[in-house]
Image (spheres, grey):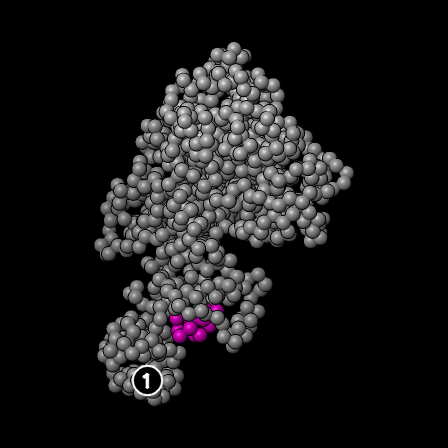
Amino acid sequence: MSDDLINIKVNQKEIQVDKNLTVMQACEIAGEEIPRFCYHDKLSIAGNCRMCLVEIEKAPKLVSSCTMPLMEGMSIITNSEKVNAGRKGVMEFLLINHPLDCPICDQGGECDLQDQAMYYGFDKSRYKENKRAVDNKNMGPLVNTIMTRCIHCTRCVRFATEVAGVPELGMLGRGENAEITTYLEQSITSELSGNVIDLCPVGALTSKPYQFKARPWELKRTDSIDIFDSVGSNIRVDSRAEEILRVTPRTNEYINEEWISDKVRFNYDGYYQQRIDTPYIKENQKLSISNWEESLKVLKDKLKTLKPLALIGEHVDLETGYAIKKFMSNYGKDNVECRTDNHAILESLDSYRFNTPLNDIENSDLIILLGTNPKIETPIINHKIFKAYNNDAKVFNIGENISLNYKTEYLGESLSSLNNENLIKALKKSTNPLIIIGSAFLNKIKNIKTLKSIFSYADKYKVITKEKNNLNFLNPYASRVGQLIIGNTTNNLCEPFSNLKKDNFELVLSFGSEHIANEQFNNCFKVYFGHHGDDGAMGSDIVLPTPLYTEKNGTFVNIEGRPQEAKKCHNPIGSAKEEWSILKKLSDELSFDFTPNTFDQLRSELFDKYPILSDYHEIIAVENSTSITPDIEFEDCKAEYPVSNFYMSDVISKNSVTMAKCVEEIISTPSLLEKSA
Amino acid sequence: MSGNHPGLSNNFSRSGEKFSWSKDNLRSIKNIISKYPKGREQSAVMPLLYLAQEQNNNWISIECIETIAETLNMPKIRVTEVASFYSMYNTRPVGENLVQICRTSPCWLRGSNKITKTICKETKCEINDTSDDNKFTVVEVECLGACSNGPMIQINNDFFEDLDEESTKKIIDNIKEGKPNVIGSQKGRRSSENA
């Protein structure tokens, strides 16, 4: 028997468990469910709801199992009359001040208090005195509060402090006067604030946009992937008929744990605004409604004579990317580009992905942020850096002096600040250093030698070793890593996209890329395949409607190189057609080879060509490239951050009313900019 | 106790004036913080709230909270939580003299109700109210720990014990006229010796 295991009994059943667990965790291992409100395994232990009472032999009173450490030989009883009576007592006290408004409460049907009251509640109240009522608090445009329902579990307070890293929530007063509030009722300024809605065990904190919209049992659940940043958080999309009503997280310990960003949680109203629902053709400088037959005929004629270039946007799935590549191969090489932001890469996968597995970030003791603002580009990664920071990691920042929710040491604005003395000293001492280089620099690097120098630098200071590769490349786009794996890029790896010779192309096909509006394409014939009308569609000659990620199946590779599937939730809006089927039709008419007849055939052809992509949920393995160039030399480039406004970073969130409210109430309210320390 | 009690309200307000530590207080703060281990400076929040209240006319304004949060490098909401938890930190302005009347059983048995009535009549203000001339704020509190000398009241930092209606009226009158008062027992008892 190992030293770490001890023998205990749960309801007379003998088990061996780790001695560092609590009584509650041991009971769970033994298969006993313990009711709880305040305990949450991602948060610190508070022990204030008292619902998890159990009996321990030889202990005079019932003990709260979430706070109680285990001891050798402990005998725990969870099903005795005494335990039941204790829990019933706690429940009666909790219900004293809880309103009986379940019929009009948004939490109804998925409420911890409701569920547990079924087991431990009395059928009628013995309480004859006045119930207390609490004023509702403002927590911003996303979180709706009905504070009379609050049972003071403090999960939201602990979440804001420990996970989101914004100590803005707190419990004021005491006893009957205790109230949960934000400091002076200001909006929560975190990008993860929506998660308090899931954490709240009662209906005190609910979703403002989802208020009075539906009951949980009416909703159809679809498992999907967050495509509004590159992390690929696992989400669950709840819809009724042809409308998405809410988005909530799915637990994935390797990626997003139990959290998702506010953008994907709340921007779904933007899915239905400004949608392109039918084909358009430009006539006399004005887009006018057309139909598929006519628009495809015009496009086919253009494709016969003009030399095309395809641009791939940030929300394009792999199957679509593969179909585009297949179609464009009929026109020669180097005519598909997903690096529309001038993203510099080397050939190997480890030069454009996040090489550290996301759940390993927290083990690092030194983190260098190079031209990245993880707080607004990828809030989930920012949370992991915050975890490392709380484990005493030092964080250095190079680029702009951005403000984050943890302390960073600012070294300077250019890449050459990597040679800063303090940094070198710290790097030499560090046992597990980590570098994150973001798009702010990657999009500016023009000399391939700089990129190679970064690898050599990482090699020199043990960021890359035989066992691990902690040199990470971070871009905020969901499609990028996957599209680069299937080679949807021109071969000039560090050559800026803006240098693409316009003479070489006469026809631009943009698949959701707004860069089609760039000046460099002014003389080209422009075709926009997309779902939202914005700059890209406005300036184009033909606009073809395509479905959103929730309206078709698709594979996305997340930033660490993990293929995942986004599933179809409902039918496309209007007459939108999937991109591959449009390309298939065009291929048939132009007599190109395009064998797949169905989406499944297309997908299996993709997986045959790129077997590494077929292993869903596993990180693609590659060998580390080390010591690429002997001398380290950084070019001078100025950081330009890809995301300046978290709530409005793409066409979909720009069209969301909820996101617009966030900008107004969270970003534009000046008093909120002065953060508490 | 009613939610209007200045020490038991969760609603904080701004005074409208900047709050910065006086020189004396800055010296005391240094001394107070040095009593706590390094990295645990935030433990000094309670003595600092007390100093701030003393300096800020006996109440804690939002400006005070922000200054304390800055001094101790801690989130403002954490300071707010502490200030709202304890009833002796006043969260709204009080009169020059904060009259706290003990109403717990021993004082009550010895007639604290009469004392309350007298005080309200003499100061012309209700419980939890401030008089029009801003001289008095009257509140009822639980035990102040001078049970054997009940009934008793506390005015700012001073205890007045062994009260009856007459002596209470005199105390209030003296304050109104700016005359000094005898602190402690009004019957000439020393501490809590046998009466």
Between A339 and A561, the residue placed more toward the observer is A339
Q: Residue drawn 64% across and 27% down?
A: A491
Question: Where residue A367 sits: x, y (%)?
Answer: 62, 46
* Residue A47 visible within the image: no
Please tell me which residue lies in front, A120 or A649.
A649
**Circle 1: element type:** helix
The residue at the point 42 percent across, 32 percent down is A533
Toward the right, the furthest residue is A630
For disc 1, the neighbor class at 10 Å (few under 14, some 14 to 19, many from 20) is: some
The image quadrant of residue B155 is bottom left
Q: What percent of the width, then of the height, locates residue A259?
A: 47, 41
Residue, far front: A284
The kind of residue on which mark 1 rests is: Ile
Q: Is residue B181 magenta?
A: no
Point out the stretch of residues depicted in magenta.
Answer: B48-59
In-front residue for pair A176/A594: A594
Pointer 1: what residue? B175
**Chain hosting mark 1:** B
Q: Position of residue A578 (x, y in %)?
A: 44, 22
- Left or right: residue A213 versus residue A7 is left
| B187, A73: nearer the viewer | B187
Q: Main secondary structure of the magenta part?
A: helix
Give the residue drawn at x 39%, y 58%. A184
Compared to B75, does A636 lie above or below?
above
Residue drawn at 53 percent across, 22 percent down:
A324
- Residue A495 found in image quarter: top right
Task: List x then y, in percent, for residue A399.
Answer: 61, 48
Horizontally, is A196 left or right of B186 in the view? right
Which quadrant would the N terminus of chain A be assigned to in this image? top right
Q: Is residue B57 magenta?
A: yes
Is residue A320 among the parts visible in the rendering? Answer: yes
